[in-house]
Every structure is written in C-alpha cells, then in structure tokens.
Image (cartoon, helix red, strand yellow):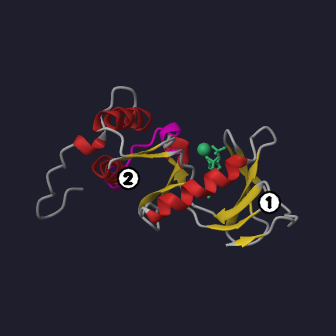
Amino acid sequence: MAILKKLHLTLGPKIGQGKNFEVYEAPAGDGVVKVLRPETPPEKLESHVGKLARLRKLGFRVPEVMALGDNWALMERIHGQTLKEIQTAGQELSLEQMEQLRVLQSRERHEGFYIGDLNPKNLIWNEGAADWIIIDPGAIRQNRDPEYIDQKLNEQAAKWFGVGAKPLAGLRRKRPCRKGGCR
Ligand SMILES: Nc1ncnc2c1ncn2[C@@H]1O[C@H](COP(=O)(O)OP(=O)(O)O)[C@@H](O)[C@H]1O
Ligand SMILES: [Mg+2]
C-alpha cells in the first residue's frame, strides 16, 4: 500500500459521515476518501485501517485500502445500500441478505470472537458480491467466553432486526422449495 502523507487530494462530493470520518468520492477512479473529522483523535485512522486488515485476514469482506495519509485513507468504494438505508426505506431483506447476516453471526459464534460496531450503517449489501461488506468495524474481541459473545450477538441482532430479535445463527433454515419453484 502506498503511504502518501503529503498528497493534496481534491475531494469529490461528500457521500457519507459517521462519528469519526467524513467520506467523499475520490477525485478519480472508483474510490472513496475517508477523512478524519477534526475532533477525532488521529490514532483512530490507523486503528480503523488495522481492523479492516485483520477482518480481511479472517476472510471477511472489507473495502481495500489503496493509500493512507496523515488524516485520510483512500479506499475502494462499495456500491449498494447500507442495512440502515434498507431499513429506513421500509424494504424487506431478501432471503440471501438474511442468510448472509446469519453467516456473519455464525462465524463469530463458532470461531469465538465478536466484531464490534456492526451497526446497520456499517454494512453495505453489494449485489455483485452477493454479500454484506463491512465498511467500518469496531474492535474484534477474540476468545471471550461464549456467554459474552452470545450477549453481544443478541445486541447485534437487535440492531439488525429490532429489539427482542434473536441472533440468526439459531434460526432454522426454511424448507427448500419444491420442484416447480417457490416464487
Ligand atoms: N468504502 C465505502 N464505500 C461506500 N460508502 C462508504 C464507504 N465507507 C464509508 N461509506 C459511507 O460513509 C458513511 C460513514 O463511514 P464510516 O466508515 O462508517 O465512518 P465512521 O467511522 O465515522 O462511522 C457510511 O455509513 C457509508 O454511507
Ligand atoms: Mg460508521
């Protein structure tokens, strides 16, 4: 990855904002530039990029980081709606979208870790990948006791599906469609 500390970037239009970053279209190519907000401690950038790299190593889908500056990172742009946008539009999740959320949670449960901050704004459904891309993870806590992970997965499920929802890892699969289809 190129480290271009002194690069002066001309930013494209703003496309998003969270607690720590303002996010802009990259000046060229299909990327985004995440710029640390002035009030955000500078070490947040390195820890953000580090968490993405760790998740990638674990086999999760995350945006590729192309270049890193003092207070910005140039990343792959992920196309699609965030889970939050899907919820706000009142759309129902497709079976595939549900299934992939279930896969995320069952991986966490079975491999004994918990990915922090997987709130609906931090997951984008990408049609091409047919998967959720994690654009903004929190700390990845490994080897905690199963009860702790269960509690955290319950909290995740509540954010994804509403208060009181159970983690999808426990759901039974729907019966397969019969010959002739199920639509
Ligand atoms: N790689 C990306 N591709 C497309 N949109 C993005 C990307 N990264 C961030 N965004 C948009 O910017 C918003 C804020 O980015 P995020 O990384 O979650 O910042 P914060 O850490 O401040 O919450 C996201 O909710 C999303 O809408
Ligand atoms: Mg975020």
The image quarter in which residue 135 lies: bottom right
Q: What SS does tag 2 mark? A: helix
Q: Quadrant of the C terminus?
A: bottom left
Query: Between disc 1 and disc 2, whose residue precedes?
Result: 1
* 131 up-or-down from 84: above or below: below
The residue carrying pointer 2 sits among few (fewer than 14), some (14 to 19) or many (20 or more) residues within 10 Å by Cα, namely some
The image quarter in which residue 176 lies: bottom left
**Residue beneath the point at 50% across and 40% down:** 119
* 11 up-or-down from 118: above or below: below
Amino acid carrying label 1: it is Gly
- Residue segment shown in magenta: 84-98
Taking the image as shown, residue 134 lies to the left or right of residue 111, namely right
Between 144 and 67, the residue placed more toward the observer is 144
Q: What SS does tag 1 mark? A: loop
* 99 up-or-down from 30: above or below: above
Residue 97: assigned label: 2
Q: Main secondary structure of the magenta part?
A: helix
Spatial separation of the CA atoms under disc 1 and disc 2: 30 Å
Taking the image as shown, residue 175 lies to the left or right of residue 124, namely left
Amino acid carrying label 2: it is Gln
Residue hosting label 1: 12
Image x and y of residue 47, in percent: 63, 51
**Residue beneath the point at 47% across and 38% down:** 90
Image x and y of residue 38, in percent: 82, 42
Image x and y of residue 3, in percent: 75, 69
> Could you tell me if residue 107 is visible in this image?
yes
